Image (spheres, grey):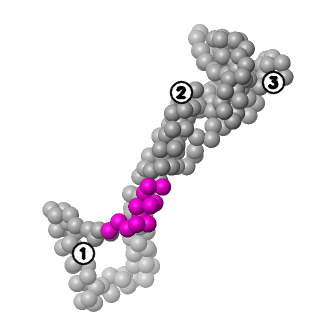
Amino acid sequence: MVLNFKNIKLKITQNKLNRFWRPIGKFWNITQIKINGEWYNCTLRFIGKDNKYYIQFRHPMKVEKRTNTVTEIICEGLYKEIETSLIKYNLAQYLENTHYINSISYNIRKSIFDKRRAMLIFSLALMPSVLFYLINANYENIIIHLIAENTWVQTFFFFLTISGFISIFHPFSFRKEIGKEDIKEIAKETMKEEKNNEEIKRRSTF
């Protein structure tokens, strides 16, 4: 997206490491300033004081995309400072992915992703319970009468109750042995994660 600040054009491009789903981290998006008809990478600094809002454009440089090599530097430090409106001030921060709203969004998405297994199990328990209520409420407690009149069903629920009570003091589960395919998949995921970490480290260092 391109934003206009008086005589300055700012382009903010999505960083590929910033995933909406399955986030691996929160990274700054790529900010560029147009100088003499060409786009230069730059950093932004946001300053708010006395109800006035300023954006500083710093360290404009040209970077080779494939190798991340700096090929040209316009200046070190501050290049220009522009006073802007509160709306553009916040919009630029949001697009750069440094606004507090970005942090809230990331934390929510990360929490949902990390707890997806628990949410799935909860949904599997909730849906049959809702269905149980709706059927009984609309068909004169047909399932309750079926359970009350069927010894096998009552025995099954009694077993679940007793086993659940026992698991409080002595948890038990059916374990699945790890096979060759599982080991290969784990190794593949580990190598992929290490590669992502190296890429993040390289970009952060740059």
**Residue 154 falls in which quadrant of the image?**
bottom left
Assess whether residue 186 is covered by the magenta stretch. yes
Mark positioned earlier in the residue sequence (3 or 1)? 3
Q: Which residue is mark 3?
A: 38
Disc 1 secondary structure class: helix
Q: Nearer the viewer, mark 2 or mark 1?
A: 2
Which element is circle 3 on? strand
- The amino acid type of the residue labelled 1 equals Leu
Q: CA distance from mark 2 to mark 1?
A: 55 Å
Report crowding for label 2: few under 14, some 14 to 19, many 20 or more residues within 10 A (C-alpha).
Answer: few
**Residue 108 visible in this rendered orientation of the protein:** no
148 horizontally vs 142: left or right: left
* Image vertical order of residue 97 relative to residue 183, above or below: above
Identified by mark 2, the residue type is Thr
Name the magenta segment's main secondary structure. Answer: helix
Mark 3–mark 1 CB contact (< 8 Å): no
Question: Does the magenta run of residues contain 47?
Answer: no
**In the displayed structure image, the side of residue 51 where residue 133 appears, left or right:** left
Give the crowd class for mark 3: few <14, some 14-19, many >=20 residues within 10 Å: few
- Please give the range of residues in magenta: 177-188
Between 113 and 68, the one lying in front of the other is 68
The residue to which callout 2 is attached is: 205
In the rendered image, which quarter contains the C terminus? top right
Q: CA distance from mark 3 to mark 2?
A: 25 Å
Going by the numbered disc 3, the residue's amino acid type is Glu
Q: Where residue 146 appears, x then y in whole percent?
A: 33, 87
Q: Foreground residue, 89 or 175?
A: 175
Is mark 3 in CB contact (under 8 Å) with mark 2?
no
Instruction: Name the side, left or right, on which 169 lies relative to 9.
Output: left
- Residue underneath mark 1: 160
